Image (cartoon, helix red, strand yellow):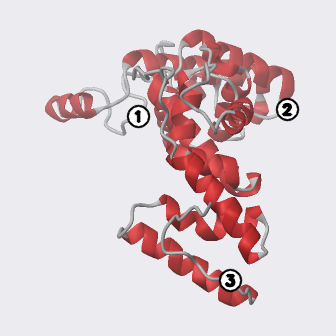
Amino acid sequence: MMKTPAQILGKNANGLQQPSWISKTPTGELQSTAKQKKTADPIGVETKALVNMIFARFMAIYGHKFKSCFETQDEIRIAKREWALSIVAFSEPQLVAAVDRCKETLAWMPTISEFLKILETIGAGDGVPSVRQAYMEACRYAGQPTQHAWSHPVVYHAGRETEWFRLRSEEERVVYPVFAYHYEMVARRFREGEVLDQPHAQGITDNRDATLYAFIKQWSQSQSVSEEKASSLLYYLTKPEGSRARASYKKKAEQKIQDEGLDVTLPESVDIKG
């Protein structure tokens, strides 16, 4: 039996929204339990209203295709909760714009992942550039990150967490997914209200990365390997001396040398020779 729109949206016989769309506990049952759930619930009333707005518009846009996505009331409750947890950091204008984009481009209701990507593509209206634009900017200015006027603090902080050295030296297929992950996490923190500081231009810069880069270039020439290969093998030198991370990455480099039959000698530390 096909569900009615009221059933899909979780409304009662009077057309009003059910008091709890994420709980299986009926209205009026065990008030103390309901009160405890309300206290522990991380989803605010405003976010729930926005999710109901999104679902109502999707039902109007996609019709029977929308209804076919959910078999039971439990499914609709679970889906709404997941959507709420995912869109909690976005404002109503941002979400409305994303739904409009869905209407223009998608034949079926989007998954949460697809919806978030649309929010990212349209910039969500908060000045945060797309991840692709941010990645290109981060790579372009990874050599002097504190000297660049970043388009948005999120770009700088995502680049810093990815590590500037990796952005300069590793292949895109390797480092782009790492940057994209950090970018999503930093953007989420920003949208949830965290204040991200912008780097200030420094008269005296830390030359450690520049020294390491010069050493890798010198080492690649002495060992007759490409700079790209050298950067990958010597990544352990970016970690603190004596640390487990450094030892682990060096062990991986040694294994790679053995697997590829390379005739090279790994250095213990950075030693620039004039």
Q: Is residue 228 above or below residue 182?
A: below
Residue type, label 1? Ile
Label 2's element? loop
Q: Name the image quarter holding the N terminus.
A: top right
- Disc 2 or 1, which lies upstream in sequence? 1
Residue linked to disc 2: 107
Label 1's element? loop
Q: Is residue 258 above or below residue 266?
A: below
Residue at 75% across / 56% down in the picture? 171
Residue linked to disc 3: 264
**Relative image position of residue 42 (x, y in whole percent):** 33, 31
Q: Quadrant of residue 36?
A: top left
Residue type, label 3? Val
Residue type, label 2? Ala
Q: Alpha-carbon distance for marks 3 and 2? A: 55 Å
Query: Quick one: 59 or 172, which is closer to the camera?
Result: 172
Q: Is residue 190 above or below residue 14?
A: below
10 Å crowding of disc 1: few (<14), some (14-19), many (20+): some
Residue at 24% across / 26% down in the picture? 28
Furthest-left residue in this view: 32
Q: Alpha-carbon distance for marks 3 and 1? A: 60 Å
Residue at 56% across / 78% down in the picture? 252
